Amino acid sequence: MYSVGMAEQGLRERKKEQTRTRLMAAAVRLFDERGYDGATVELIAAGAEVSVPTFFRYFESKEDAFLSSSRAQLDRLEGAILERPAGVPVLEVLRGFINEVLGGEQVSDRLAMKRFHSVPQLQDRLREYEDRVRQLVTEALADELGVESSNLRPQMLAGCIEGAFGAARRAWLEGPRDESLEDCANRALDLVEQMAEPLLRESNKESGEGSPQKES
C-alpha cells in the first residue's frame, strides 16, 4: 500500500510539473506572438489546455508565468545561500551560482530577456524577486561581518552586489554578442570582491581575536 501511494504521489507531481511547463511555454509563445498586453491569462490557460482557475493555482499573475525561468534561477540562488555550509562566504556562493547556472545562457535567452526587459510591468515584478534575494544576501553578509542586518556595511555590500548583477545583465543585453552572461557577471563580481575585501578582512581579523559582539 505504501509503495502504491508513493507511486500515485509521484505521478501527481509529474502531472503538475507538466502542467506548469505547458503554461510557461504558452506564456512565452503568446508573448512573442501578441506582446505583453495581448498575452492574456485566458489565452495562456487555453494554450496550455487548462482552465483559468488552474492557471492561478500555478502562478499569481501572468508576469510570474513570463518570468518563471528568472524566478527559478533566483529561487535556486536563495537555496544555495540558505543551505551553504558553515564558514562558506556569500561571495563564494554567488561565484558558484554564476558559473553553474548562468553559464548555460544562450543567444535565445538574451533575445527573450531583452524583450521582457522592454516591459515596465515585468521589470517591476523582477525587481520584487531581486529585492527578496538582496535582503537574504544582506542577512548572510551581516552574519559574516558580525553585525546586525540593519548595519550600513552589509546593506551597502548587498546593494553593490545587486547593482553589479544588474549592470552585468545590461552589459550582456546590450554588449558584444560574443560575451556571455557568465563572463559579464564574473567581471562584475570581481569588482564587488575588490571593494568588499577591506571590510571582510577587517571582520576576519576581529573574529580571530575572539567572537565579536554584533554591532547595531
Image (tube, helix red, strand yellow):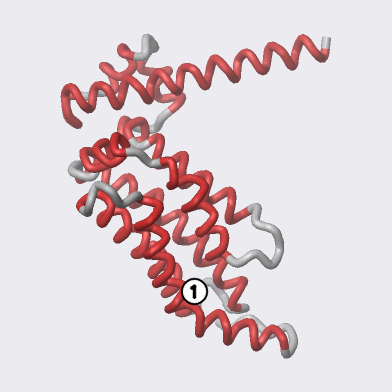
Please state if 115 lies on the left or on the right of 195 as rendered. left
Q: Residue 153: horizontal and vertical position, in percent?
A: 47, 79
Indicate the quadrant where residue 24 lies: top left
Circle 1 crowding by C-alpha within 10 Å: few under 14, some 14–19, many from 20:
many
Indicate the quadrant where residue 8 lies: top right
Q: Which residue is mark 1?
A: 154
Q: Residue 145: horizontal and vertical position, in percent?
A: 59, 77
Please state if 170 lies on the left or on the right of 77 as rendered. left
How many callouts does the rendering have? 1
Local secondary structure at mark 1: helix
Q: Residue furthest bottom?
A: 209
Look at 38% across and 64% down and name the residue there.
187
Amino acid tagged 1: Pro
Look at 40% across and 49% down and name the residue there.
129
Q: Residue 88: horizontal and vertical position, in percent?
A: 65, 64
Q: Residue 128: horizontal and vertical position, in percent?
A: 37, 50
Instruction: Decide which of 71, 108 is in the foreground and name it.
Output: 108
Q: Is residue 213 above or below residue 14?
A: below
Indicate the quadrant where residue 28 lies: top left
Look at 65% across and 52% down and name the residue there.
83
Instruction: Decide which of 100, 5 is in the foreground and name it.
Output: 100
